[in-house]
Image: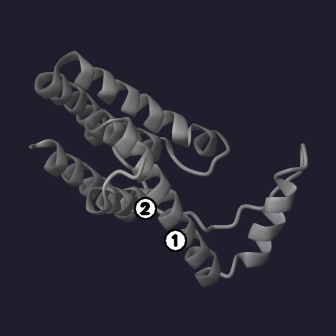
Amino acid sequence: MILTPLTLLVVGIAAGYDYMTRRIPNFLTFPAIILGLGLNAYYYGFPGLGNGALGMLLGIALLLIPFFIGGMGAGDVKLLAAVGAINGTAFVLTTFIYSALIGGIMSIIAIILKRQFKATMSNMFLFMVPGAKMSQPKTGIPYGIAIFLGTILSFYTGVIW
């Protein structure tokens, strides 16, 4: 089946781009979404297309709030949408959970290494106060790597839902 190698190729390239440039390019994510939907329709007919479309929408929905509050970029959202379009709803949910856990660990490591613990804790409390000014610690991580590792874990462990 081509869906697994396609997924690993897309998330692997995206992780590399994200690591090098802190961006995940549209020329990677949009064709992956279209190809994923098309292959699902080809292999599984209308039900496959539906599962791919719902997986894409779920991938978007899961990262929409973090995107809107500035916690991640649009490329991360589109990458998870591509994973959903290729593999469907159950797989993208599993990948999201693993990616969130890995991303959390990566964030903690970045906070420690960049000595941003105090600013991060302050921002966590100020986030709940309407109109409060938060500092801008430089602890961003290339979340495409977390999605890549979460995808690998999803394939390795199987869908947990």
Q: Quadrant of residue 110?
A: bottom right
Residue at screen point 35% across, 51% down: 159
SS state under label 2: helix
Residue at screen point 61% across, 46% down: 66
The answer to whether residue 55 is above or below residue 113 is above
Name the one closer to the observer, 58 or 81.
58
Q: Residue most toward the top?
A: 46
Cβ–Cβ under 8 Å for marks 1 and 2: yes
Q: Position of residue 92 (x, y in %)?
A: 39, 43
Q: Label 2 amino acid? A: Ala
Name the one closer to the observer, 91 or 119.
91
Q: Left or right of 154: which side holds 111?
A: right
Q: Which residue is mark 1?
A: 106
Residue at screen point 38% across, 33% down: 55
> Does any portion of residue 35 appear in the rendered image?
yes
Q: Which numbered circle lies on residue 64?
A: none
